[in-house]
Amino acid sequence: MRYLFAKEGHEDILKDLINSVRIDSNQEPFEYIEILNSFNLKENILDKESIVDVKAKTKSGETIIIEIQRIGNQSFIYRSLYYWAKSYYTNLKSKDIYSDLTPVISINILDFNLIKDSDKPHSCYFIKELETNHILTNHLEIHFLELKKFNNNNNNLYEGLSDWFKFLNSKDKLEDTMEVLVKKNPIMKEVYDEYNKFVKSNDLYNGYSNYERDYFNVLMLNEERIKGIEEGIQKGIEEGIKKGIERGKEEGKKEQQISIARNFKRAGIDIKIISENTGLSLDEIEKL
């Protein structure tokens, strides 16, 4: 997918996907798309944590980010918001003013179900007023394409986006699917040609297989780190509570000793006797 969408020269393929998503959401399509992070197998795998899969810009200044994820859970919602926020924040240079900020459009292609209580394969989110549905701004626009929710025989998607869902969902019968799509949608011939070029190129295919292997190794390592941090935090909390209770007991015991010593002193008992019976020092008793 990164090869298809982010490789230099594939701007028309990327633009067709983006415009299909936009049109399905009743938004205006774009005439020009510039890829900002071109496909490169030599990139550092550790940078994957902070760089989205595809980043592009339109002629009018909108930033478009695309994230492609095969596995995930509800936490992906927060991840998508984080990537959107990071892209929005970096659009503002040090000498710019807030009105210089430009919209960021986030498109997330997911091979797992994310949005609960919804069967829609394509969901689009804006910031809206709760009762009137008035859109506050077009600067936040987040799309989720949930591949597993797509039904080939029953969907209300824009035809161009439906074709993309068919391609992205084709695993066992790709040739049969593409034979139909290529005849009806010109961009799909280019998509299929580039797909075949990728899988038949040892350098590209093996290079990306190594990249993906390293990527999932990093994911596993990060999960272990997070688990270790969580366990450390829990242990720290438990030790803190234990120490707090012990300290509270000590402070309570001290207060009780002072109260007894003060009463003994008022009764005229010798401070040495008070010290022996309360454990307080002579100096502490004299100050009472």
Image (cartoon, rainbow, N blue to C red):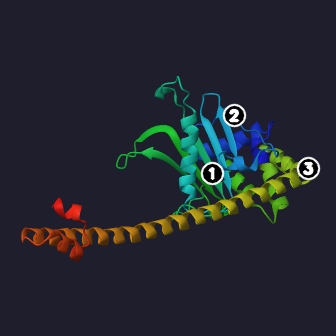
Vertical order, 60 against 14 (above or below): above
Q: Which of 198 and 28 is in front in this view?
A: 198
Q: Say few, some or many: other residues with alpha carbon within 10 Å of mark 2 (under 14 / 14 to 19 / 20 or more).
A: many
Q: Which residue lies furthest to the left in this view?
A: 267
Q: Name the residue under label 2.
A: 33
**Quadrant holding the C terminus:** bottom left
Is the C-beta separation of discs 1 and 3 under 8 Å? Answer: no
**Please, what is the three-letter code of the amino acid marked with disc 3?**
Asp
Quote the CA–CA distance across marks 1 and 2. Answer: 18 Å
Instruction: Write down the quadrant of residue 152 in the picture.
Output: bottom right
Q: In this view, does 262 lie above or below 28?
A: below
- Label 1 close to label 2 by CB (< 8 Å): no
Instruction: Identify the residue position indicated by label 3 in the image.
Output: 203
For label 2, the SS is strand
Q: Could you tell me residue 156's position as x and y percent?
A: 59, 56
The answer to which of 158 and 274 lies nearer the viewer is 274
* Residue drawn at point x = 74 percent, y = 56 percent: 215
**Between tags 3 and 2, which lies in front?**
3
Identity of the amino acid at label 2?
A: Ile
Q: State which tag comes first along the sequence, 1 or 2.
A: 2
